[in-house]
Amino acid sequence: MKLYLEELKKKNVIQETIIKEKKYYEMTEDGWRFLHKLKQVREFTDAFGI
């Protein structure tokens, strides 16, 4: 799990915030854009039965 989170942070998909010794993760603007593009690809492939 740590490797996956590190990869997402390096790609600026998520950001880590530490508050009172607890780690929190949230999507960045780049992460939301990626998710939107992924949804478009899925809709395209579904429309053409790919």
Image (cartoon, grey):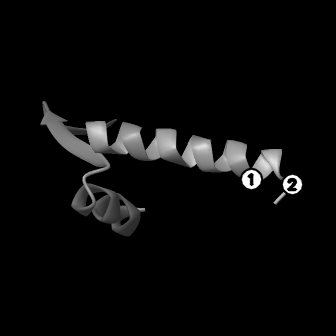
Amino acid type at image mark 1: Thr
Q: Secondary structure at mark 2?
A: loop
Q: Secondary structure at mark 1?
A: helix
| Distance from Cα at disc 1 to Cα at disc 2 | 6 Å
Question: Considering only vertical position in the picture, is 46 above or below 24?
Answer: below
Measured as percent of width and height from the top left, residue 34 is found at 42, 47
Q: Quadrant of residue 22?
A: top left
Q: Residue furthest right?
A: 49
Residue 48 visible in the displayed image: yes
What residue is drawn where x is 30% and y is 46%? 14
Question: Considering only vertical position in the picture, is 19 above or below 1?
Answer: above
Question: Considering only vertical position in the picture, is 2 above or below 47?
Answer: below
Q: Quadrant of residue 30?
A: top left
Q: Decide if residue 48 is on the left or right side of residue 36.
A: right
Q: Quadrant of residue 8?
A: bottom left
Neighbor class of circle 1 (other Cα within 10 Å; few <14, some 14-19, many 20+) is few
Q: Decide if residue 18 is on the left or right side of residue 27.
A: left
Q: Quadrant of the C terminus?
A: bottom right
Q: Decide if residue 40 is on the left or right side of residue 30.
A: right
What residue is drawn where x is 35% and y is 69%? 3
Residue linked to disc 2: 49
Measured as percent of width and height from the top left, residue 37 is found at 50, 45
Residue 25 visible in the displayed image: no
Dot 1 and dot 2 residues touching (CB under 8 Å)? yes
Q: Residue furthest top?
A: 20
What residue is drawn where x is 74% and y is 53%? 45
Count of numbered badges drawn on the protein? 2
Q: Decide if residue 43 is on the left or right side of residue 38.
A: right
Residue linked to disc 1: 45
What residue is drawn where x is 86% and y is 54%? 49
Nearest the eye: 3 or 41: 41
Q: Quadrant of the N terminus?
A: bottom left
